[in-house]
Amino acid sequence: MASDSIIPLLLLPDELITEILLKLPIKSLLKFMCVSKSWLQLISSPAFVKNHIKLTADDKGYIYHRLIFRNTNENFKFCSLPPLFTKQQHTEELFHIDSPIERSTLLTHIVGSVNGLICVVHGQKEAYIWNPTITKSKELPKFTSNMCSGSIKYGFGYDESCDDYKVVFINYPYNHSSSSNMMTVVNIYTLRTNSWTMSHDQLQGVFLVSHYGRFINGKLYWTSSTCINKYKVCNITSFDLANWTWGSLELPSCGKDKSDINVGVVGSDLSLLYTSQRGAATSDVWIMKHSGVNVSWTKLFTIKYPQNIKTHRCFAPVFTFSIHFRHSEILLLLHSAIMIYDGSTRQLKHTAHVMHCEEIYVESLVNPLTISDQGRRNQDSPQSSHS
């Protein structure tokens, strides 16, 4: 925007300026933060950032949504989501993205994303909360206890009750042969306090199957089993980020024997992808709906796979999925493939194989460093110490 056009805009009422700026994409807002101190304070204020996130979340065209994954060179790449629906953009036409972890990404994986923030982990101890849009990241403090002795499951989400972002690591030691005597270690990180809290044995007799919990409406969800050495999904285990309590959900009556069940997200709802057996030609999509305090499963639709598509045979309950709708098309994101279906016939229109389809994230102004600094200042203030 030219300087002569900025001057009349500065003469507008503050409320109108705010409304105009809220409708702009992140790239424009980052430039406008340099216009004046007042605009910098406005655009970086918590209220503005939250309102912009809300408008972004309400975006049905996925204009601000990005898909991040790794290619064959193990580098992180991203592309815009809308063109994938119309096949205007192929997975070869990608943009490089700099991860906060500069070493090889072979041991680097993405736990999840919420409000534009991504939790990325390297190995079993090094973790970051990262906003790739504004290139800001916060390194999490290292564990004070040994977390490398077993299998680790992960989760990342947002606690709206205290406006905080939390990371959950669940460790299952290798030296237990059965779930009856498993001593799990649960570590919970909160961004505002920049600290970990450790608890023991909260999941007696429960083994989380999926590597990463899916975050929906304040809770994380994993497929789970009763045996640490087998991956037969028995139910869904949840973790409430606000009160740190565990819960469980029964599976829908879709058959539990010789089947693969993946937990995922359809829009903003918890869902399951049920495949009757390895190599099956179809998968059923089930969605969980709330009615007051009651929850119920509803079969949404069935996806049909062509005979020459073998990606569905690689489904495993340790991986998650997501489905997005745009106009008359369905976008299915799996661990190793992107599939586009005709919304009316459920027939496959396009597929693209990728090395690791990691996560969908939205562009946002949320700065993890600012949130952590605010929490530290609140802890250090005389009023908080007095209380």
Image: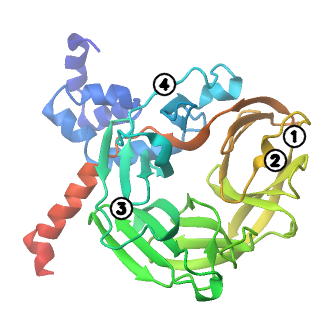
- Amino acid at pointer 1: Tyr
Residue that carries the numbered disc 1 in the rendered image? 305
Q: Position of residue 169 (x, y in %)?
A: 46, 67
Q: Relative to 25, does residue 324 appear above or below in the rendering?
A: below
Q: Secondary structure at mark 2?
A: helix
Instruction: Decide which of tag 1 and tag 3 comes sooner along the chain.
Output: 3
Q: Name the residue at 30% across, 52% down.
A: 139
- In the displayed structure, 127 sits above or below 15; it is below
Element type where label 4 sits in the image: strand
Check if mark 1's residue and mark 2's residue have beta carbons within 8 Å. no
| Element type at mark 1 | loop
Which of the two discs, 1 and 4, labels the residue nearer the N terminus? Answer: 4
User: Tag on residue 25?
Assistant: none
Q: Amino acid at mark 2?
A: Arg
CA distance separating discs 1 and 3: 42 Å
- Residue 169 in view: yes
Q: Mark 3: which amino acid?
A: Asp
Instruction: Assign the N terminus to one quadrant of the image.
Output: top left
Direction from residue 198 to residue 225 in the image, left or right: right
* Residue designated by label 2: 313
Q: Earlier in the sequence, mark 2 or mark 4?
A: 4
Residue 281 percent coordinates (x, y): 91, 46
Relative to the observer, which residue lies in front, 176 or 267? 176
Q: Which residue is mark 4?
A: 95
Residue 379 lies left or right of residue 44; in this view the side is left
